[in-house]
Image (tube, rainbow, N blue to C red):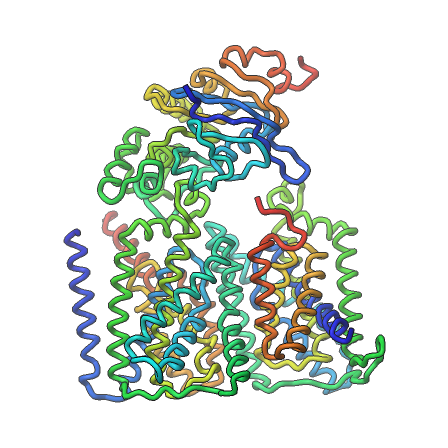
C-alpha cells in the first residue's frame, strides 16, 4: 500500500511534466529536449522566492507560468520557426530540432551552472507527515500530487471543451486538415509550445517542494517525460496520465525491492517493452 | 492464363471508416487498367494495398497467382510491383541518374555498378530526358520530376506498374506529352494500373476500367462501356443529375 | 576500380603513415593530444558512417565506448590483450544490434531518446552489479604506453576509413542514402530499410567499443562514472556534424579544431564546457548546416558558377 501510494504520487507529478512535453510535441511536432531545463528553472524560481521571501511555492506558480509561457513562445518564434520553414523533409527538421533543443538545453544548464554553481538545492516546505491508510507520507508530496491532479484535470477539460483546446487537438491529429478548416497552424503551434513550456515549469515549481534539484538534473526529467509521452501516445492526455502513473509506480517498485540506483533502468525496461509491443502507445491505433 | 494482379475481396479499414470495401478485380498481361472514381472513393488506397504501402484488413492480393497479401512493400517491389506516388517523391540529395538507379539496384531485376548506370540512362531515354541525367533534381521542371519518378519505377523492370495520378497537375502541353509517353509504354506491352482523373487520358490509354465509389467497386469492363454506364455517371455527377 | 579511387587510396595511406610518425617527436604532450584526436577521429568517423546518410542521431557512443573499456577491464587479468579487442567489437556489435532492432524500425525521435539514456542505463546496471558483487572498480595494469595506444588508434582509423570507403561504393551505402532521403521510397524500390540501418549501426557500435577497449589501459583504474560519460556522445556528435557528414573525411575536419577548442576551454574555464557544447550545437544548426564540408561545397559551387558566368 505504502509503495502503491508513493508510486502514484510520484506518477502524478510526472504526468504534469509529460503533459507539457506532449502539448509541445503533439501540436508543434517538435520534440523539445530542453523541456527538463524549463522544469529546473521553474524549480529554481520556487526555491529562490521561498528562501528569499518565504513565498509559498504554490503562489510562485502564478509567476512562473506566464514567464515560462513568454520564454517558450520566444524560443519557438525565434529559433524553431525558421527551422520549420527551411526544412526540406521531415527527417531534416527532426534532426535540426533535436540539435537545436539539445543545444538550448546545454546552454541553459551552462548558464545556470555559471549563475548558481553546481550545488544541489532544496528547501523544506510543508515537510510534515500526513497519514494515509495507516502510513506516513510527506505533506509536500501529497500537496504536489493534488496540484498536479488539479492542473491535469483542468488541462484535460480545457482541451476537450474550449474552442482553443479543440483547435489544438485538431492540429495534433492532422496539421494539413486543420489548415483547411481555417486554423492558423503556425500561430497555434507557437501557443501550444509556449503553453507546454509553462505547464512543465509549473511542474518544476511543484516538484521542487519535495525533490532535490541541481542545475544538471533537467535531462533526467526530459528523458522520463519523453518515455511517458511515447508510452501514452502522442497527443493523448489520458494515455499520458496512465503512462506517468505506470512509470511512477514502476520506479518506486524497483527502488524499493531491487535498488534505488536502478530507477532509470526501470524506466528503460518499460520503454523497451512499449517499443516492442505497443509502439503506438497505450490507447493509440496502429500507425498507418 | 493467370492474371498479373488479382484482388479478391480486398478490404481496408481505418478505425470505423471502410476505405476499400470488398474489392475484387484482375489485370491481365499487357493490359492497361484504369482505376477511376470520384475523390475519396478509395482508388489510391487500393493502389497502396497492392504496393504494400498499407496492409489489407481483409481479402487477398496475388501477383501472377502467388499471394503477396501481407508482405512488406520491399518484398512486393522485389516480386515485380513498381509505383509512382500521388505527390512526386524524388530523392532530394541525388541527381537524376542516381534517382533512377535507386529503382534499378534494389528492384525486381537487380543491377549494380556500371550496368545499373547504363540501364538507368537507357530508361531515361525511354522517358525522354536522357540529356538531364546529371542534373540535380531541384533543377527540374514539374513534368520532368514526374518523368524521373516514372523512370525510377521502370528501372526495376517490373511485372506491373502502378501510376497514382501520374498526369495530375500537368498543363495542357505537358499533358499531351505525358499521355504520349504512357502510350509508348502501353505499346511496349507493359502491364499498368493507373489511378486517373483525366478523362481524355482514360479514354485513350485504358483497355479496361474499374470504377470505385465510397470504397466499393460499382462497375467494371471495357473503358467505352464503363464510361457510358448510368450508374458510373451518377457516381461522378451525383444523384440529382441522373 | 577507377583511377580516382586508386589515388584516393594512395593519399589516404600516405596521410595515415604520416600520422603514425607522430610519436617519433618524443613530445609527451603532443602524443597525448594525438591520442585524443585519434580517438575522436575514429569515433566521429564511425558515427558518421551510420548517422550521416540516415540522419538518425545516435547518442549511444558513450555506452558502446564504456562497454568496450569494461571488456578490457574485466578480461585483462584472464585473457591476452590482443583477444580483447575482437571481443569488444563483438560485444559492442551485439549491443548495437539489439538497440537497433528495438528502435530503428521507428521514427528518429524514438531512436535519439533511446540512445540518450543508454549510457546512463548501462552505467546504472554496471554500478548495481558491482555493488552487489562487492567491488567498486577495476585496475587495468598493462605495459602499453601512450605510443602503443596511439598506433592502435591510427590503425583502427585506417580500418574505419577503409570500411567507410567500401560501404560508400556498395549497394548498402547507396541504400542508406536513399533511406536518408525518403524512407517510403526506399521501401518501395525494394530496400530492406531496417536491416540496412541495423547493419551500419552495428559497425559504428563495434568500432566505438573497440576504441573503449584500446583506451582502457590509459585510465589504469576504471569505474562506471569514468567509463560511461554522456559528454562523450555529445562531443562526438558535434565533431562529426561540425566537420560535415557529407564526405568520409568530413568528421576529421571537425575533430581537430573542436578537440583543441575543448582542451583550451576545459583547462581555462572548466565550468563552461556545458555552455560550449550548447553553443556549438546551435552554431552548427544556424551557421554551419552541413558542417565545414557543406561550406566548402557551397564555396566551390559558387566559384564554379561565377567562372561559368565570366
Q: Quadrant of residue C35?
A: bottom left
Q: Quadrant of residue C239?
A: bottom left
Image check: B102 left or right of A23?
A: left
Q: Position of residue B230 (x, y in %)?
A: 62, 12
Q: Is residue A29 above or below residue A138?
A: above
Which residue is depicted at the point 64% across and 74% down? A254
Q: Position of residue B80 (x, y in %)?
A: 39, 33
Image check: C83 left or right of A33?
A: left
Which residue is depicted at the point 42% across and 40% down? B75
Which residue is depicted at the point 16% across and 69% down? C14
Q: Is residue A62 visible?
A: no
For this rendering, which residue is in front, C234 or C141?
C141
Question: Which residue is situated farthest in the front direction here?
Answer: C78
Q: Is residue A140 above or below residue B38?
A: below
Q: Position of residue B172 (x, y in %)?
A: 44, 23
Which residue is depicted at the point 44% across and 52% down? C194
For this rendering, which residue is in front, A144 or C259?
A144
Q: Position of residue B193 (x, y in %)?
A: 45, 26
Q: Is residue B33 visible?
A: yes
Q: How many marks?
A: 0
Q: Is residue A61 above or below residue B4?
A: below
For this rendering, which residue is in front, A119 or C119?
C119
Amino acid at each position: 500500500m505504502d509503495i502503491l501510494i508513493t508510486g502514484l504520487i510520484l506518477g502524478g507529478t510526472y504526468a504534469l511534466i509529460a503533459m507539457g512535453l506532449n502539448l509541445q510535441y503533439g501540436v508543434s511536432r517538435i520534440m523539445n529536449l530542453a523541456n527538463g531545463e524549463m522544469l529546473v528553472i521553474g524549480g529554481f524560481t520556487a526555491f529562490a522566492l521561498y528562501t528569499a521571501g518565504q513565498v509559498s511555492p504554490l503562489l510562485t506558480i502564478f509567476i512562473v507560468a506566464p514567464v515560462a509561457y513568454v520564454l517558450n513562445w520566444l524560443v519557438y518564434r525565434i529559433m524553431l520557426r525558421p527551422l520549420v520553414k527551411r526544412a526540406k523533409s521531415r527527417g531534416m527538421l527532426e534532426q535540426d530540432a533535436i540539435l537545436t533543443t539539445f543545444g538550448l538545453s546545454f546552454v541553459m544548464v551552462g548558464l545556470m551552472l555559471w549563475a548558481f554553481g553546481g550545488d544541489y538545492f532544496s528547501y523544506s516546505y510543508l515537510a510534515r507527515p500526513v497519514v494515509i491508510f495507516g502510513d506516513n507520507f510527506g505533506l509536500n508530496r501529497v500537496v504536489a500530487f493534488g496540484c498536479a491532479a488539479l492542473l491535469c484535470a483542468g488541462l484535460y477539460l480545457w482541451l476537450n471543451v474550449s474552442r482553443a483546446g479543440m483547435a489544438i487537438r485538431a492540429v495534433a491529429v492532422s496539421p494539413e486538415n486543420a489548415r483547411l478548416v481555417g486554423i492558423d497552424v503556425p500561430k497555434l503551434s507557437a501557443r501550444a509550445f509556449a503553453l507546454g513550456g509553462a505547464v512543465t515549469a509549473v511542474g518544476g515549481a511543484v516538484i521542487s517542494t519535495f525533490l532535490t534539484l541541481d542545475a544538471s538534473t533537467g535531462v533526467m526529467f526530459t528523458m522520463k517525460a519523453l518515455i511517458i509521452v511515447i508510452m501514452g501516445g502522442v497527443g493523448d492526455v489520458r494515455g499520458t496520465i496512465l503512462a506517468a502513473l505506470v512509470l511512477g509506480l514502476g520506479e518506486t517498485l524497483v527502488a524499493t525491492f531491487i535498488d534505488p540506483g536502478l530507477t532509470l533502468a526501470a524506466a528503460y525496461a518499460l520503454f523497451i517493452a512499449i517499443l516492442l509491443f505497443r509502439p503506438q502507445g497505450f490507447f493509440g491505433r496502429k500507425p498507418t | 492464363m493467370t492474371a498479373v494482379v488479382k484482388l479478391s475481396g480486398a478490404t481496408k479499414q481505418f478505425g470505423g471508416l471502410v476505405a476499400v470495401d470488398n474489392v475484387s478485380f484482375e489485370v491481365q498481361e499487357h493490359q492497361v487498367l484504369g482505376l477511376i472514381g470520384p475523390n475519396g472513393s478509395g482508388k489510391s488506397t487500393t493502389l497502396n494495398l497492392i504496393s504494400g504501402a498499407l496492409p489489407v484488413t481483409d481479402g487477398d492480393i496475388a501477383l501472377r497467382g502467388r499471394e503477396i497479401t501481407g508482405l512488406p512493400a520491399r518484398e512486393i517491389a522485389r516480386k515485380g510491383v513498381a509505383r509512382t506516388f500521388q505527390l512526386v517523391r524524388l530523392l532530394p540529395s541525388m541527381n537524376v541518374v542516381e534517382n533512377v538507379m535507386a529503382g534499378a539496384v534494389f528492384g525486381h531485376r537487380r543491377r549494380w555498378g556500371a550496368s545499373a548506370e547504363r540501364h538507368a540512362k537507357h530508361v531515361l531515354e525511354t522517358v525522354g530526358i536522357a540529356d538531364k541525367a546529371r542534373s540535380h533534381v531541384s533543377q527540374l521542371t514539374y513534368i520532368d520530376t514526374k518523368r524521373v519518378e516514372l523512370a525510377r519505377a521502370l528501372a526495376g523492370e517490373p511485372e506491373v506498374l502502378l501510376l497514382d495520378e501520374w498526369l495530375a497537375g500537368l498543363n495542357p502541353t505537358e499533358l499531351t506529352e505525358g499521355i504520349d509517353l504512357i502510350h509508348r509504354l502501353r505499346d511496349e506491352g507493359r502491364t499498368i494500373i493507373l489511378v486517373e482523373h483525366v478523362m481524355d487520358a482514360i479514354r485513350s490509354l485504358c483497355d479496361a476500367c474499374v470504377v470505385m465509389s465510397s470504397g466499393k467497386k460499382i462497375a467494371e469492363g471495357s473503358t467505352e462501356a464503363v464510361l457510358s454506364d448510368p450508374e458510373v455517371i451518377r457516381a461522378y455527377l451525383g444523384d440529382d443529375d441522373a | 576500380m577507377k583511377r580516382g579511387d586508386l589515388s584516393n587510396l594512395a593519399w589516404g595511406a600516405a596521410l595515415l603513415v604520416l600520422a603514425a610518425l607522430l610519436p617519433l617527436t618524443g613530445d609527451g604532450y603532443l602524443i597525448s593530444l594525438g591520442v585524443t584526436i585519434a580517438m575522436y577521429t575514429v569515433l566521429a568517423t564511425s558515427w558518421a558512417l551510420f548517422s550521416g546518410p540516415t540522419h538518425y542521431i545516435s547518442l549511444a557512443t558513450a555506452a558502446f565506448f564504456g562497454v568496450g573499456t569494461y571488456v578490457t577491464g574485466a578480461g585483462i587479468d584472464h585473457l591476452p590483450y590482443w583477444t580483447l579487442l575482437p571481443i569488444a567489437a563483438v560485444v559492442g556489435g551485439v549491443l548495437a544490434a539489439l538497440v537497433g532492432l528495438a528502435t530503428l524500425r521507428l521514427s528518429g525521435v524514438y531512436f535519439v531518446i533511446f540512445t540518450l539514456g543508454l549510457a546512463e542505463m548501462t552505467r546504472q546496471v554496471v554500478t548495481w552489479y558491482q555493488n552487489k558483487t562487492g567491488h567498486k572498480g577495476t585496475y587495468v595494469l598493462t605495459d602499453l604506453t601512450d605510443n602503443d595506444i596511439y598506433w592502435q588508434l591510427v590503425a583502427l582509423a585506417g580500418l574505419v576509413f577503409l570500411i567507410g570507403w567500401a560501404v560508400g561504393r556498395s549497394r548498402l551505402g547507396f541504400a542508406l542514402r536513399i533511406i536518408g532521403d525518403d524512407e517510403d521510397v526506399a521501401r518501395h524500390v525494394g530496400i530492406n530499410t531496417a536491416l540496412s540501418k541495423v547493419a551500419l549501426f552495428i559497425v559504428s557500435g563495434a568500432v566505438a567499443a573497440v576504441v573503449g577497449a584500446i583506451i582502457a589501459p590509459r585510465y589504469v583504474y576504471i569505474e562506471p562514472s569514468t567509463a560511461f560519460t554522456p559528454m562523450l556522445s555529445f562531443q562526438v556528435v558535434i565533431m562529426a556534424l561540425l566537420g560535415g557528414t557529407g564526405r568520409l573525411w568530413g568528421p576529421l575536419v571537425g575533430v581537430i579544431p573542436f578537440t583543441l577548442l575543448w582542451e583550451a576551454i576545459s583547462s581555462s574555464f572548466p565550468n563552461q564546457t556545458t555552455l560550449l557544447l550548447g553553443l556549438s550545437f546551435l552554431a552548427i544548426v544556424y551557421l554551419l548546416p552541413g558542417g565545414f564540408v557543406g561550406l566548402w561545397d557551397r564555396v566551390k559551387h559558387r566559384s564554379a558558377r561565377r567562372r561559368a558566368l565570366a
